[in-house]
Amino acid sequence: MTARAADRARYDRATAHLDAPLAIVDLEAFDANADDLVRRAGGKPVRVASKSVRCRHLLERVLAKDGFAGIMSFTLAESLWLARSGFEDILLAYPSADRARFAELAADPKLAAAVTVMIDDPAQLDLIDSARDGGTEVVRVCLELDTSLKMFGGRVRVGARRSPLYSPAQLADLARTVARRPGFRLVGIMGYEGHIAGVGDAVSGRPLRSRAVRLMQATARRELAERRAAVVRAVRAVAPDLEFVNGGGTGSVQTTAAEDAVTEIAAGSGLYVPRLFDNYTSFTGRPAALFAMPVVRRPGVGVVTVLGGGYPASGAPGPDRLPVPYLPEGLSYDPQEGPGEVQTPLLGSAADDLLIGDKVWFRHAKAGELCERFAELHLVEGDRVTATVPTYRGEGHTFL
């Protein structure tokens, strides 16, 4: 029996009393992945990206482990909710225009102490001030560095279009603006190198592309390490009490941690290890989060149909954004249909061994987005479900 077949047997036994659709997290794999992130971070704390987890119970579990400290959140509403739930160090990774929540933040000492907001433009400070509604608490702010690689005089750009702040001078200018402005305190710098951390460099069947990605990433790492160090020096000259410099992502933990200028690493997808993280030479994780759909039809030889399954991930549309049938091995989509909103036909010899009501296990393309589809996660240890915990959705929250 292969390791994957053994996992399927365990998951089927653990959930035999439960009807699909359902989602699980294998806690042994989850904990092993957490330990690997800490190992790769080389002594620097790992801040957990909540959008890749979207379950308070599992955020608490990972933050209880040595080597993890703080949350990187994705909306201001989520940040305040987490702070009110007892989490104490929350970095909002994206600028917000949520005036009502800024009013809450500026009026509450506990929230203002726990939450740091992201800015990359003085206009965002104006928006926060206009939303205060009498609140006088000092708002903690972080500057975001554009980490993209620019070549040929800027005519070629590799990386996400995020912050407009690229050079040390630009970040130092905004740091001075924050320092002069009452009601704000600059506490950190963040830079997410998605073109390094979020792009696989060992794509199966595409050796030339993989080699090109590795070359691009090596160039980008060298350029960014030099520029980020210069940015930190320039900003610390304005704000010597800077508390943190955050960088990285699951795919670049060890290389980002090697930069002296970086004080902490951000990661989250590496806990669940969705399918987008299968194509890396730098690490190998264990799939920890899966969902199961029931077989409801057997249309013919080599074909079964499962209920639902059409859960595409965000990003540029393409086959890599689709869930993948994982267990039993040997199933694939019908290219004329793909995964459907209500039903999904699956092809392959393994289909002939499946009966009506059997479970087919899938892996989502991205991590936390799976939790937008399920209200609860069944936590598996060995071949038992030892707990069932709510996702954000299960607690009544869909923040985006």
Image (tube, grey):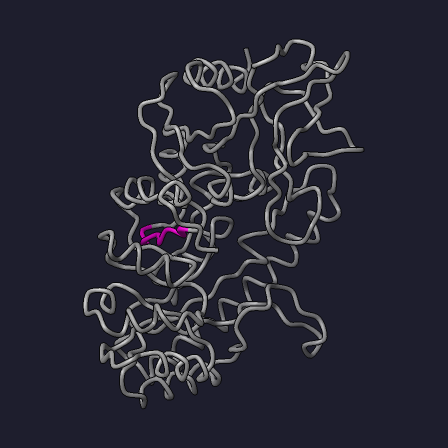
Q: Residue at x 64, y 72 (%)?
A: 150
Quadrant containing the N terminus is: top right
On screen, residue 394 versus residue 222, left or right, reads left
**Viewer-side residue, 394 vs 191:** 394
On screen, residue 133 versus residue 367, left or right, reads left
Quarter of the figure with residue 288: top left
Return the x and y of residue 244 as percentages of the image width and height: 32, 67
On screen, residue 228 versus residue 396, left or right, reads right
**Viewer-side residue, 207 vs 272:** 272
Quarter of the figure with residue 154: bottom right
Which segment is the magenta one? 43-50
Question: Extreme bottom residue here?
Answer: 180
Quarter of the figure with residue 331: top right
Return the x and y of residue 369 as percentages of the image width and height: 51, 45
Figure check: 330 above or below 136:
above
Question: Extreme left residue here?
Answer: 109
Q: Is residue 47 shown in magenta?
A: yes
Figure check: 1 above or below 347:
above
Q: Residue at x 59, y 58 (%)?
A: 195
Figure check: 166 above or below 368:
below
Q: Residue at x 22, y 52 (%)?
A: 86
